[in-house]
């Protein structure tokens, strides 16, 4: 058994007041992990608050438990004094936003599956073998003896399903399937999770068509990229939440190895998502640009003019693409 896993479980068991936090720009795995840990620890009689210092995309509110996730302001105002800060799915301290304020006064436990994790906690259980952080939370809950019902099983399943692209990505290994099977046998419902993403507003279709209008291909169609400006969102009554999954559409093009989607979520602030199909290391590119992530999915945020950032990022991507061995072979074909 992993030493950090055991110390985290032992210390959680001994603690009474726990603050569970996720990362900024939360995704399904993060929200699932935060809620599964919060609800699990509460079932053991602990006082637990959960926080994410970012707006949660509207479609996750299909699960009413998402309302339990508090803002930074709400947690501050509550006067809650946690002994433990349990940080989930965040690869570095800056990823938790203003919750960094609790860093000095608490025992900090980090549970994550990103290779780019900087091991910034007092105890760090970081294991890149897991397809999702939700599976790591499931192990913590199991070790602590948390009882599962349909709700908790479905929430926990959400992280596994979303981080593996609904069991399609290369991280969908045997453990992913056996963990999912276990949750399904406890009452977890994959169809309830998938419904979150099959609940689109018509404005999102329009936004997708604009993203497709902006699409450009490079290197014999091996790199696909596109962007949306703040104005594109506003003119279509959308926010950045509405473009979730667009980068996956770019990657789905035949022949594309690297897909890049740049999203100006606040004027002059751009989030960039990278996705690759077979060999390109997205985490390497994201790290060069100040972000992080996994080999097949990574991201970063940059400040400045959108069009300047598009140029810079594509230049950096092309350079790394050319110097990565497989591409030189491919391009020489
Ligand atoms: P997405 O493109 O969906 O925002 O993120 C893809 C992956 O990269 C996720 O695992 C996410 O946590 C990670 N990621 C995205 N943006 C950043 C960033 O700015 N810094 C770090 N360290 N990781 C990021
Ligand atoms: Mn994750």
Image (cartoon, grey):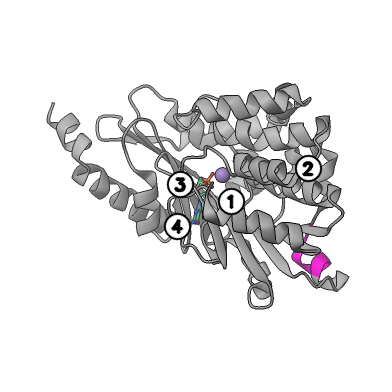
> Closer to us: mark 2 or mark 4?
2
Residue density around tag 4, few if under 14, some if 14–19, many if 20 or more, within 10 Å: many
According to the picture, the residue beneath numbered tag 1 turns out to be 89
SS assignment at label 2: loop
Q: Is the residue under label 2 in contact with that under label 3 (CB below 8 Å)?
A: no
Q: Which mark is residue 123?
A: none
Q: Earlier in the sequence, mark 4 or mark 1?
A: 1
Count residues near mark 3 (Cα–Cα under 10 Å), then give few for <14, some for 14-19, many for 20+.
many
> Residue 31 at x, y = what percent?
69, 46
Q: Nearer the viewer, mark 4 or mark 1?
A: 1
Q: Position of residue 263 (x, y in %)?
A: 53, 49
Query: Which residue, as the protein is rendered here, is positioned at the far bottom?
Result: 104
Q: Residues within 10 Å of mark 2 (few under 14, many from 20)?
A: some
The stretch drawn in magenta includes residue 260: no
**The quadrant where residue 103 appears:** bottom right
Query: Bounds of the magenta span?
Result: 70-75
Q: Are marks 3 and 4 in contact (CB under 8 Å)?
A: yes
**Mark 3: is the Cβ under 8 angstroms from ligand 1?**
yes
Q: Measuring 58% from the left and 59% from the top, which residue is drawn there?
A: 110
Q: Which mark is residue 298?
A: 3
Disc 3 from disc 1: Cα separation: 13 Å
Asked if the beta carbon under badge 4 is closer than 8 A to the nearest atom of ligand 1, the reply is yes
Q: Is residue 198 visible?
A: no
Q: First in sequence, mark 3 or 2: give its number.
A: 2
């Amino acid at each position: 058994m992993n030493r950090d896993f055991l110390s985290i479980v032992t210390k959680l068991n001994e603690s009474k007041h726990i603050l569970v936090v996720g990362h900024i720009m939360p995704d399904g795995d993060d929200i699932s992990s935060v809620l599964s840990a919060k609800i699990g620890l509460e079932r053991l009689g602990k006082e637990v608050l959960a926080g994410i210092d970012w707006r949660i995309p509207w479609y996750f509110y299909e699960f009413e438990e998402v309302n339990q996730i508090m803002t930074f302001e709400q947690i501050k105002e509550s006067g809650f004094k946690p002994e433990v800060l349990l940080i989930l799915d965040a690869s570095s301290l800056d990823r938790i936003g203003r919750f960094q304020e609790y860093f000095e006064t608490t025992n900090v436990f980090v549970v994550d599956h990103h290779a780019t994790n900087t091991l910034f906690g007092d105890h760090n259980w970081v294991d890149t073998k897991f397809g999702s952080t939700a599976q790591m939370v499931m192990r913590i809950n199991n070790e602590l003896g948390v009882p599962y019902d349909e709700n908790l099983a479905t929430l926990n399943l959400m992280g596994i399903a979303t981080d593996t692209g609904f069991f399609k990505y290369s991280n969908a290994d045997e453990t992913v399937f056996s963990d999912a099977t276990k949750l399904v046998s406890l009452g977890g419902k994959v169809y309830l999770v998938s419904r979150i993403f099959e609940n689109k507003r018509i404005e999102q279709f329009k936004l997708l068509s604009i993203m497709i209008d902006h699409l450009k291909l490079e290197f014999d169609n091996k790199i696909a990229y596109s962007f949306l400006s703040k104005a594109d969102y506003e003119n279509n009554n959308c926010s950045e939440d509405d473009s979730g999954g667009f980068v996956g559409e770019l990657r789905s093009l035949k022949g594309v190895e690297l897909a890049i989607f740049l999203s100006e979520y606040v004027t002059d602030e751009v989030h960039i998502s990278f996705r690759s199909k077979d060999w390109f290391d997205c985490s390497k590119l994201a790290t060069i640009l100040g972000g992080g992530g996994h080999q097949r999915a990574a991201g970063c945020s940059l400040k400045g003019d959108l069009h300047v950032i598009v140029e810079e990022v594509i230049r950096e991507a092309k350079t790394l693409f050319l110097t990565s061995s497989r591409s030189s072979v491919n391009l020489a074909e």
